[in-house]
Amino acid sequence: MIPLRDANPTRRRPIVTLTLIGLCFAVFGLELTISSGPGGEAALDAFFRQWGAVPSRITAALGGTADPASAVAGILGSLFLHAGWAHLLGNMLFLWIFGNNIEDRLGRGPFLAFYVAGGAVAALAQVWIGPTSEIPLVGASGAIAATLGAYLVLYPGARVTTLVFLGFFVQVVQLPALVLLGFWFALQLLDGVASLGATTAGGGVAFFAHIGGFVAGAIVGALIRTGGGRGPDSALRRRI
C-alpha cells in the first residue's frame, strides 16, 4: 500500500517539513556526486561510514570508550542520507503526507526537536539489536516512523488516499490512518522478528529502527492527546 495524500488540512505552511525534504534531496545530490567521482562506490561507502550511524561506534561511545561527538554526528547525519532513489522518494513521500500535520500540531520548533529525537531513539533501538554491527544506518525512516506513530494516535480517523496492489490489480481507496499505519507497523514487526539472527553483511533494512521510532512517536502522540493540547499554539549500510 502506498499513500498518495491525506484529507487532513493544516493551518499553516509546513516550513520545517519542506526544509527537511529539501535537505535530504540536497544531500542525496552530494551522494550522487561522490559516487560518480574517481572513488565511485568505495568513496560513497566511506562517506556513509563517516556520516552514518554506525552501531559499534555508538555502543563504544555509550560505554565511554569512544568519542561521543562522533556518535552524535553519525546519528544526526544519518537522518539525511539515503541508499538510493527508491529509498529517498519513499521516505520523502511519507514525510510530506504525514509530517505537515504533526508540524502543525506541535509547532515548528517542537516538531524539529521531536523529529530529531525520534530519529535518535530509532537509531538506538537498532543499536540495541545489533550493538557490534559495523554497517552504517542511513535514512530518515526512523524519524519518519516517529511521525507516523504520532499521526496514528492523533488522527486515527483521518482519510488517506492509498494505492493498493492486489496481485495484478491496482486500486485507489480511502483508508483511515489507523488501518494504513497500523498495517505498516504490523509489517515492520513481522519483518523485524524474521530478521533476527539473519546476517546481512551487505546491508538491509533496519526494521527495529522503524519499530523504535514508531513506538516513541506514538507515546508522544498519546501524551499530547491525553493532555488535550495542540502544542505551543494552545499553551555497505542499513536503510532506515
Image: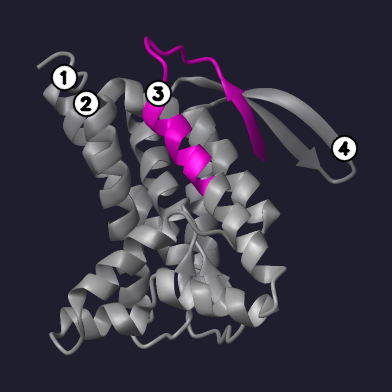
Mark-to-mark CA distance, 3 and 1: 16 Å
Quickly name the residue at label 4. Answer: 169
Question: Cβ–Cβ below 8 Å for labels 4 and 3?
Answer: no
Going by the numbered disc 2, the residue's amino acid type is Arg
User: Considering only order in the chain, which callout, 2 or 3, is on the residue closer to the N terminus?
Assistant: 3
Quickly name the residue at label 3. Answer: 101
Question: What is the magenta range?
Answer: 1-24
* Residue lying at the far left of the rendered structure: 235
Element under disc 2? helix
- The residue shown at (37%, 31%) is 16
- Identify the disc placed on residue 82: none
Question: 210 or 159, which lies in front?
Answer: 210
Quickly name the residue at label 2. Answer: 225
Quickly name the residue at label 1. Answer: 228
Q: Report if residue 9 lies within the magenta region.
A: yes
Q: Residues within 10 Å of mark 3 (few under 14, many from 20)?
A: many
- The residue shown at (57%, 46%) is 25
Q: Relative to residue 206, is residue 5 drawn left or right? A: right
User: Considering only order in the chain, which callout, 4 or 2, is on the residue closer to the N terminus?
Assistant: 4
Relative to 140, residue 226 above or below: above
Q: Relative to residue 167, is residue 184 drawn left or right? A: left
Q: Visible in this render: residue 236?
A: no
Mark-to-mark CA distance, 4 and 3: 31 Å
Q: Position of residue 211 (x, y in %)?
A: 40, 57
Q: Residues within 10 Å of mark 1 (few under 14, many from 20)?
A: few
Relative to 14, residue 19 above or below: below
Mark 4 vs mark 3, foreground winner is 3
